[in-house]
Image (tube, rainbow, N blue to C red):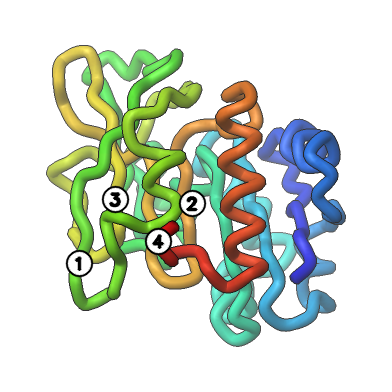
Amino acid sequence: MKVFVIKLRSSNWPSVYSALNRMGIDSLAINIVELTEVSDQSIIILPGVGNMQSISREIEEDLGIDNLKFLFHSFQHKVIGICLGFQFMCSSSDEHIESKCLSVFDERVSSLYEDNHPSVGWKEINYYLSIEANNYSIENSLNKQLEKNFYYFTHCYGVKEKHITKEALTYIYELENKEKVVAALIKGNFIGLQFHPEKSGEDGLELINGMISRIQKKALFDAD
């Protein structure tokens, strides 16, 4: 199962691509229009840095957001969204409410603080909830790499607890005011990571490597 990194202008795709290379993962960086030529059931990484208006406009102009969603579903790609890439996979964002999102997650993105200052630094991730109908288990193989580990965050917007729909396997971290914010979502073929694994040291690299390895083995949710 091939790994593709989407080369968005509104992203830090070179950092993600470089991290994959350091781990010896066979990957290819492609423009989003080249996604139409990618074979079925590939692993697609959608990185993002910047703001919702820029990523939404870029994808709409270059390929079309509805077309991107169709490709993801029709070809059963496994998609990993990172930071802004994850937020774009949600239903809407208060950062720019007019910007269309991918809506593979039903969650809404909102400002973390009233004064819009960022949440930056290493945060501890905790397991939050899952829906039994999705057949996810708290004992799944990713749990050991996610829960109680620290990863690097830098973002002003995110999915707050009041906007969690409870339709996906969910991991959270707490802001300084103890408010819960989504750190990771897993739903079907889609994984959203609010943190930057490529900036999270060895643990972050091992997480990416573990995710990709288990997806390739079709064992993402198998217990060890």
Q: Which of marks 2 and 4 is nearer the N terminus?
A: 2
Residue at mark 1: 131
Residue drawn 62% across the image and 22% down it? 201
Q: In this view, does 107 lie above or below 9?
A: below
Residue 50, image x and y in percent? 58, 32
Q: How far apart are marks 2 and 4 (CA)?
A: 30 Å
Q: Distance between the residues labelled 2 and 1?
A: 23 Å
Q: How busy is the neighbourhood of tag 3: few (under 14 within 10 Å), some, or many (20 plus)?
A: many
Residue 93, image x and y in percent? 36, 46
> Is any part of residue 103 visible from this angle?
no
The quadrant of the rendering that contains the C terminus is bottom left
Residue 71, image x and y in percent? 64, 78
Q: Which of marks 4 and 3 is nearer the N terminus?
A: 3
Q: Which of marks 3 and 2 is nearer the N terminus?
A: 2
Q: What residue type is labelled 4?
A: Ala
Residue at mark 4: 223
Residue drawn 19% across the image and 59% down it? 165
Q: What residue type is labelled 3?
A: Thr
Residue at mark 3: 170
Residue drawn 27% across the image and 55% down it? 138
Q: Which amino acid does label 1 sit on?
A: Ile
Instruction: Kindly state the secondary structure of the residue where label 4 is placed.
Output: loop
Residue at mark 2: 88
Residue 108, image x and y in percent? 29, 50
Position of residue 140 in the picture relative to residue 102 (left or right):
left
